[in-house]
Amino acid sequence: MKITDQIHFFPWMDMRVNNGNTIFVDGPVKVLIDPGHAQTWPLVERQMSAQGLDTGHVDLVIATHGHPDHFEAAASFPPPTRIAMHPDEERYIAEIGPAFYQAMGLRAPEVRVDLHLQEGDLKLGDTEWLVIHAPGHSPGSICLYQPQDKVLITGDVVFAMGVGRTDFPGGSGDLLKRSIRNLSALEVDVLLPGHGQAVRGAAEVKQNFAFIEQAYFPML
Ligand SMILES: [Zn+2]
């Protein structure tokens, strides 16, 4: 699904398989955000190829966080592709990774993080982005905001009518609430979550944040 000339969204629609949504940012620097599970990556790759996107050339893989349904396939991208995540997430995955992945019947991928993404500006090719540290679902979760087109990529922090789990190791309801409040202050026209469908339209995004605050915050 084409969101802008550069941003392509590949929502995972098969509910029988837990896989995160993948986002591809085209342009002078080609960026893949959350490639997903290793065994489901070929299916995403096929969809990208069908849209004429060159999956053989990815400059940067960004993980919104290190859970297997977002990050496992990062191991399929050897150098010169660079792998990026928040430093807190790299530490977290190094600590809990093997046990966490094992609990899901998986082997933790060799963590090769080439680039740390901290809160602040990020230039991808000719486009300015903002990295937002948004802990709560995991300690080093990040969201990515592109102010020009008002696109917000939220990983497992916010979904359409939902929020990320806080019961995994390293989760925190208080931190998640703080992170979501922080995100809700942004001007957003398109919200691209890590699971489920996109939220499109400024009013719909505002409504989504309002619903979450009302329905989920008391439980967090
Ligand atoms: Zn997750």
Image (cartoon, rainbow, N blue to C red):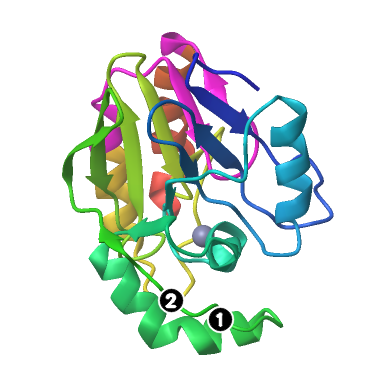
Provide the secondary structure element on which disc 1 rests: loop
* Marks 1 and 2 close (CB-CB < 8 Å): yes
Occupied quadrant, residue 150: top left
Residue 90 on the magenta span: no
Instruction: Estimate the x, y position of residue 3 in percent, counting from the top left.
Output: 54, 18
Instruction: Estimate the x, y position of residue 175 in percent, counting from the top left.
Output: 27, 57
In the picture of the structure, the residue carrying the numbered disc 1 is 108
74 with respect to 141 (left or right): right
Q: Quadrant of the N terminus?
A: top right
In the picture of the structure, the residue carrying the numbered disc 2 is 111
Provide the secondary structure element on which disc 2 rests: loop
The segment highlighted magenta reads 182-203
Point 54% across, 37% down: residue: 23
Within-10-Å neighbours for mark 2: few <14, some 14–19, many 20+: some
Point 34% across, 59% down: residue: 85
Q: CA distance from mark 1 to mark 2?
A: 8 Å
Instruction: Estimate the x, y position of residue 135 in percent, counting from the top left.
Output: 30, 57
193 with respect to 28 (left or right): right
Count of labels shown? Answer: 2
Depth check: 62 or 58 in front?
Answer: 58
151 with respect to 41 (left or right): left
Point 28% across, 46% down: residue: 179
